[in-house]
Image: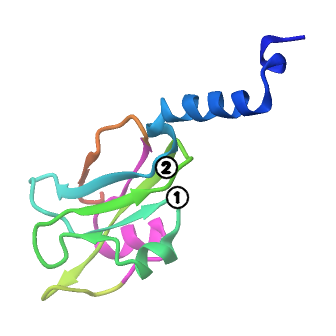
Amino acid sequence: MSPAAALPALAQSALLLALAACQPESAANLEFTFDAVDTNEQARPCMIVVDDDWTGAAERHQWVNVTGDDVLTITLPAPKTEWTVTVAPLLVESGQITRVPHSRKDARDYSGFADEVRLVRRTDPRRQLFILPRRAP
């Protein structure tokens, strides 16, 4: 019989709770802050899309640099350990988005800027800067 099997059920539960408490980072949601600039280091209006959820990103207004130079903080859910983040360029006129993209292709074709896709992991820095170049003709 293993030592774990010999422990009473209550002691096993207490042990599991103690082990879980030692690793709070693995069970907690994490906040990441996103920003985007172009190759001239100017604020670039963009939509931040997590795990290819374009509809959700639009509904939650997950954009940066639309009305000025700002950032977006998003809470990424546990228990995942990594997320695919797409920063899609937006065209803005007078502080208003002219068209919300529904795909990477849509964003690239309409804006004239390239998008960037990055795998963001729990251990990555909490502030993520994306640099979007002009799309080649």
Q: Horizontally, is 26 left or right of 98 in the view? A: right
First to last magenta residue range:
100-120
Which amino acid, by three-letter code, is at mark 2? Trp
Tell me the crowding category of disc 1: few under 14, some 14 to 19, or many 20 or more residues within 10 angstroms, Cα based: few
Residue occupying image coordinates x 73% and y 33%: 10
Q: Quadrant of the N terminus?
A: top right
Q: Quadrant of the C terminus?
A: bottom left
Q: Is residue 54 above or below residue 43?
A: below
Q: Is residue 81 above or below residue 22?
A: below
Give the SS element for disc 2: strand
Q: In the image, residue 14 lies at what x, y percent?
A: 64, 32
Which amino acid, by three-letter code, is at mark 1? Asp
Q: Earlier in the sequence, mark 2 or mark 1?
A: 1
Q: Horizontally, is 19 left or right of 71 in the view? A: right
Which labelled disc corresponds to residue 86? none
81 or 21, nearer to the observer? 21
The verdict on residue 108 being magenta is: yes
Residue occupying image coordinates x 28% and y 61%: 73
Contact (Cβ within 8 Å) of mark 2 with mark 1: yes
